[in-house]
Amino acid sequence: MRPRCSTCRGWSATRCARSKPETDPICLFEVYSEGNFIEATPDTCYFQIGESKYGKPVIDRVVTRATGLQEATKCTIVSFDSTMRSNISVGLPIDLAVYETDSLKLKLQKRIEESDPYFRMVHTQWGEGLRRVFAELPNPDWT
């Protein structure tokens, strides 16, 4: 199956976006090296670039189409922290860019370094919170 967006056909890239003319909605694809792809739809409300094994479960549990930009940005930071915890090849700095639908204008652009107070707070509170919730779960009674 090939992408429906005629502008993107034949491109050799991992991401393909098409600008929004008056007569056609914007289309976005994630194209894999094997040639298969995912099109952005109501069921696929985000794409994750790069390492996705460790941080993606966090996003999958939190982000929906109704999630606001602030919440999605917070979840992205938690996802990066989770990935860095489990994969030594992923680390700071993180370059973050946020824009609103159809704006094509950056709402936020930030480089997150090790000294960033928000990132350090998320790292600490997320780790402590996971340990606390885990400790509160009852042990299985499978005897």
Image (spheres, grey):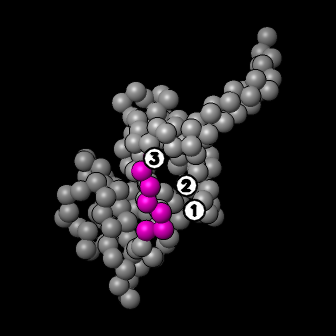
Q: Amino acid at mark 2?
A: Thr
Residue sitting at the far top: 143
Query: Quick one: SS at disc 1?
Result: helix
- Magenta stretch encompasses residue 124: no
How many residues crowd mark 2 within 10 Å: few (<14), some (14–19), many (20+)?
some
| Image quadrant where one finds the C terminus | top right
For disc 1, the marked residue is 69
How many residues crowd mark 3 within 10 Å: few (<14), some (14–19), many (20+)?
some
How many residues crowd mark 1 within 10 Å: few (<14), some (14–19), many (20+)?
some
Please name the residue shown 32% across and 73% down the image: 18
- The dot on residue 53 is none
Q: Which residues are magenta?
A: 106-112
Q: Is 7 drawn above or below residue 29 in the view shown?
A: below
User: Where in the figure is residue 17, as x and y percent of width and height?
Assistant: 33, 67
| Image quadrant where one finds the N terminus | bottom left
Q: Nearer the viewer, residue 52 or 140?
A: 52
Left or right position of 57 against 34: right
